[in-house]
Image: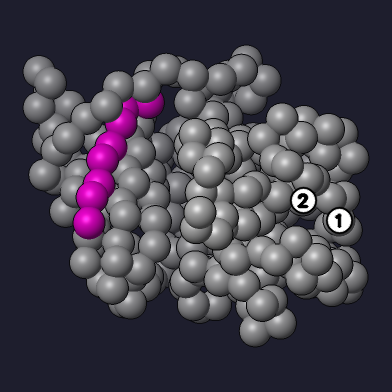
Amino acid sequence: MSRKYVVLLTGIGGNTAQGVARPLMKFRDEFTIVGTDCDRYNVLFGRRYAKKVYLVPRASSPDYISTLTKIVAREGVDVVIPSPDPEVLAITKHRHEIHASTLLPSLRAVEIAQDKWLTYRQLEGKVGQPKTYLARSREDVEEAFRELGSPIWVRRKRGAGGSRSFLAHTPQQADFWISYWRGYDEFLLSEYLNSRNLSWIGLYRDGELIASGGHLRLKYFMKHTSPTGVTGNINVGVTTQDDKVNSIAERAVEAIDSRVSRVYTADLEAKFTNGVVLAILLH
């Protein structure tokens, strides 16, 4: 019998890790799943997916990497698949200390992808994007409203799931929201597209796109908990295939990571007429 591969999923209490774990569980003869999480309650949730789950420090802790390396050695881990974003960044920075495959992009690619402002600047002139400003001061808010009109999409530079996003109809609303979160220099002001939301995922190997697919988001899970109705977690979606979506998403990925050999996702807004995609913007 061939040796089973040991896969370590960090953030095992979250949707991303569990989404990876579910298909792996169908191949129990080939894979053993080990999990980690920084929340003791999530450790309990993760036990339904992993043979063993460890409680670890947060990624910001100086003990995080040393704890992780000990688990990798103890369990004979072959591959580490990290989530959420803070753990992805920490493991990317310290991958040379982890004696297992991580399958992660370059540090530069991760830093760009995790910062919406850096992503916007990296993709300028390469793909269509909504006009966006970095909110450094109240003057930037005023200028954004003069240039973009109302309403304006206010969102954090970093973070997933629509965290702290807000649809501001006046400069006063935007200033209040950003000030409330003490977020000047941490929030973006973007053109509000008010169109249909798409997600794209592509699997690359050695720079070649092996397979890709997309879906149209129709409804967000627990949208009532967010002031914008956007939570990042899809409740209802429809599989879709469109050459325009593929083209823009592929160009965006290649602009961020020229040596693509992993899974990438992209979020897009599309304007439809009679079911036909007229325009797509990366967001």
What residue is drawn where x is 83% and y is 33%? 44
Q: Give how far across and how far down residue 88 sits, in percent.
A: 63, 62
Vertical comparison of 279 with 253: above or below? above
Q: Give how far across and how far down residue 103 sits, in percent.
A: 49, 68
Within the image, what quadrant is residue 78 found in?
bottom right
Q: Is residue 214 magenta?
A: yes
Residue numbers of the magenta segment: 210-217
Q: Secondary structure at mark 1?
A: loop
Q: Residue furthest front?
A: 1
Q: Earlier in the sequence, mark 1 or mark 2?
A: 2
Q: Label 2 near label 1: C-beta < 8 Å?
A: yes
Indicate which disc residue 56 carries: 1
Q: Give how far across and how far down residue 119 sits, in percent.
A: 44, 64
Indicate which disc residue 11 carries: none
What residue is drawn where x is 25% and y is 47%? 212
Vertical comparison of 183 with 50: above or below? below
Vertical comparison of 96 with 223: above or below? below
Using the image as rendered, state which of residue 147 and residue 194 is in the foreground.
194
Q: Is residue 176 magenta?
A: no
What residue is drawn where x is 39% and y is 55%? 264
What amino acid does circle 1 point to?
A: Val
